[in-house]
């Protein structure tokens, strides 16, 4: 066995990545005792490293730590005598050239790529909700019409989305930098399965004792209900990009979406209408065939990537038009209420800081007068 091994978990978004990352972060000390490093002072360090490798800007903010972030992460991995695990779903969009640079920068470690994959029928609603959480305004119907097209991966606004969702294409790009046996596809178990199944698959693959880690890591990246997601989309329409990203992230993405809307009880789940099922089934079959022919290591079962189009989930709706007004009103009222409480708390905190600042200034004046 090589002295150093690096596992790059490169996506896909909405396949349990947040849960896996939270477990890795929460159990750093236990992992290091097993000879496993989760690098970076915090997970943002891995986000910045991915952006640096890919040549992307970090939203609309000036981020002084972005330049050289990948090289710093690679240096930390190179200095560790054991196994390093990096988990950042943005890496799924890497070009073959960027993949080669990542692998070369980690030399002489033996580099592996891990890709967690979920069936497209469950991914579609999650992808639309994720876009809404990041300020996008397209309706569910327009999203499906744009995504479920044969040329969507090559042209149009959903090119980047498919670059991070087409498992076979992502593995093919990384296979230009690595042998196929070092590319691992971990399938997400069917709906209703315990999250421990995904963790056990992932942990066993990278050499972690699955039972050694605490899986009670708090709030996950929980999906929104249809009413909650549609309400959030309408808020984005009204905002019309007038809020700067740091404020939007704090108030809308983190607080409104994750703290308020994600926690609502018994949400109506969003389902893909039957008119798109044939396209999704064909696309899924093509992806599964590409994965089989690629010769990659599969942890789980590729049949879990087949969409169960004949089994709509209970309490599911296919469109915001299926909602009754009360279903939209309730999350809207709760959102306004919780935002007012949140802003009141912030005002009290600000008043306390101002009071402390005035006390410091009075003390400084007395010191100068004395």
Image (cartoon, rainbow, N blue to C red):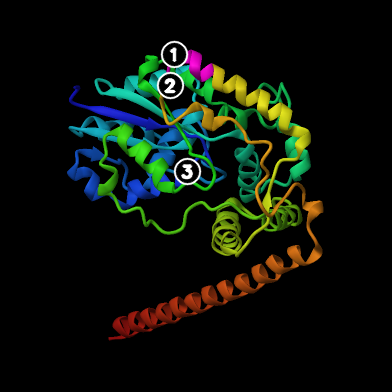
The percent position of residue 199, horizontal first and vertical second, equals 38, 43
Q: Nearer the viewer, residue 333 or 40?
A: 333
Q: Main secondary structure of the magenta part?
A: helix
Mark sitting earlier along the chain (3/2)? 3
Tell me the distance, in whole angstroms, between the alpha carbons under discs 3 and 2.
23 Å
Q: Please report whichever mark, 1 or 2, sits nearer to the chain's N-terminal start.
A: 2
Q: Residue at x 49, y 75 (%)?
A: 350
| Residue 307 within the magenta-colored segment of the rendering | no
Specify the quadrant of the image occupied by residue 66: top left
Residue 136: % across, % down: 68, 46
Q: Can you tell which mark lies on residue 99?
A: 2
Residue reaching furthest to the front: 310
The residues colored magenta run 290-296
Residue that appears at 68% across and 44% down? 312
Judging by the rendered image, the residue that carries numbered circle 3 is: 16
Q: Tell me if residue 292 is in the magenta stretch.
A: yes
Where's the C terminus, which quadrant? bottom left
Horizontal side, residue 154 vs residue 353: left or right: right
Image point (47%, 53%), residue name: 220
Residue 1 in which image quadrant: top left
């Amino acid at each position: 066995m090589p002295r150093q091994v690096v596992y790059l978990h490169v996506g896909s978004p909405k396949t349990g990545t947040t849960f896996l990352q939270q477990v890795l972060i929460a159990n750093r000390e236990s992992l290091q005792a097993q000879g496993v490093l989760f690098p970076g002072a915090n997970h943002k360090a891995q986000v910045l490293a991915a952006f640096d490798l890919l040549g992307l800007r970090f939203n609309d903010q000036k981020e002084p730590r972005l330049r050289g972030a990948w090289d710093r992460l690679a240096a930390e991995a190179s200095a560790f005598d054991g196994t390093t695990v990096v988990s950042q779903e943005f890496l799924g969009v890497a070009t073959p050239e960027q993949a080669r640079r990542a692998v070369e920068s980690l030399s002489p470690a033996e580099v592996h790529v891990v890709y967690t994959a979920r069936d497209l029928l469950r991914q579609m609603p999650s992808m639309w909700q994720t876009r809404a959480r990041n300020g996008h305004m397209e309706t569910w119907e327009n999203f499906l019409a744009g995504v479920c097209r044969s040329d969507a991966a090559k042209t149009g606004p959903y090119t980047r989305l498919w670059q991070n969702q087409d498992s076979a294409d992502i593995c093919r790009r990384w296979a230009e930098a690595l042998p196929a046996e070092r590319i691992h596809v971990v399938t997400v178990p069917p709906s209703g399965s315990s999250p421990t199944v995904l963790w056990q698959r992932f942990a066993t693959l990278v050499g972690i004792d699955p039972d050694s880690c605490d899986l009670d890591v708090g709030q996950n990246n929980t999906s929104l209900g249809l009413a909650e997601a549609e309400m959030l989309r309408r808020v984005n329409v009204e905002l019309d990009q007038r809020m700067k990203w740091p404020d939007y992230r704090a108030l809308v993405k983190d607080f409104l979406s994750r703290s308020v809307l994600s926690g609502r009880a018994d949400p109506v789940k969003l389902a893909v209408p039957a008119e798109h099922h044939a396209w999704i089934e064909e696309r899924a079959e093509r992806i599964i065939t590409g994965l089989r022919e690629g010769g990659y290591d599969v942890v789980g079962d590729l049949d879990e990537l087949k969409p169960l189009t004949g089994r709509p989930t209970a309490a599911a709706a296919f469109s915001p038009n299926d909602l009754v007004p009360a279903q939209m009103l309730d999350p809207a009222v709760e959102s306004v209420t919780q935002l007012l409480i949140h802003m009141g708390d912030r005002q009290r905190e600000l008043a306390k800081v101002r009071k402390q600042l005035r006390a410091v200034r009075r003390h400084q004046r007395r010191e100068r007068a004395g």
